[in-house]
Image: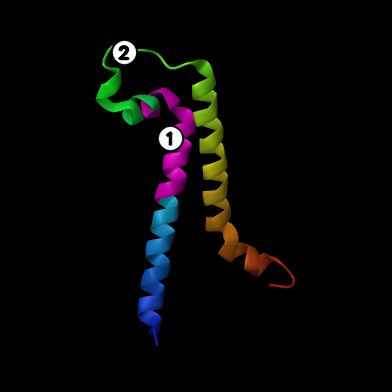
């Protein structure tokens, strides 16, 4: 059976991963062109610009991932706020 210390360590690691995930998603929303260049790598050395539809899709995905990360980070506080939690 897991000790209390190891459970706290696992919770801390999960929280840090969620903070990184949420921060990365917010970065994607703010800078989709930089993410496009990063994902394409050396294949697009001709500096071909992405279509605006692709940038909007990247932003929308970032918004969803950021919202999911924020929701998962807030879940422990929601248990305290809800009357049946």
Query: In which quarter of the view is residue 4 placed?
Result: bottom left
The crowd level at tag 1 (other Cα within 10 Å; few <14, some 14-19, many 20+) is: some
- In the picture as drawn, the residue positioned furthest to the right comes out as 83
How far from the left and from the top, in percent, is residue 70? 54, 50
- Is residue 81 rendered to the left or right of residue 6? right
Residue under the point 64% across and 63% down:
78
Which residue is labeled 1 in the image? 27
- Is residue 50 rendered to the left or right of residue 38? right
N-terminal-most mark, 2 or 1: 1
Give the distance between the C-alpha atoms of the residues marked 2 and 1, in whole angstroms: 21 Å
**How would you classify the magenta stretch by its main secondary structure?**
helix
Residue under the point 45% across and 33% down:
28
Residue situated in front as seen by the camera: 77 or 39? 39
How far from the left and from the top, in percent, is residue 85? 68, 72
Q: Is residue 21 magenta?
A: yes
Which residue is labeled 2 in the image? 47
How far from the left and from the top, in percent, is residue 48? 36, 12
- Is residue 75 rendered to the left or right of residue 7? right
Circle 1: element type: helix
């Amino acid at each position: 059976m897991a000790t209390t210390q190891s459970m706290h360590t696992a919770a801390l690691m999960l929280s840090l991963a969620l903070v990184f995930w949420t921060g990365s998603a917010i970065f994607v929303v703010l800078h989709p062109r930089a993410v496009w260049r990063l994902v394409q790598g050396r294949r697009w050395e001709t500096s071909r610009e992405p279509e605006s539809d692709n940038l909007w899709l990247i932003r929308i995905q970032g918004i969803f991932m950021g919202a999911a990360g924020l929701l998962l980070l807030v879940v422990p506080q929601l248990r305290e706020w809800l009357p049946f939690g």
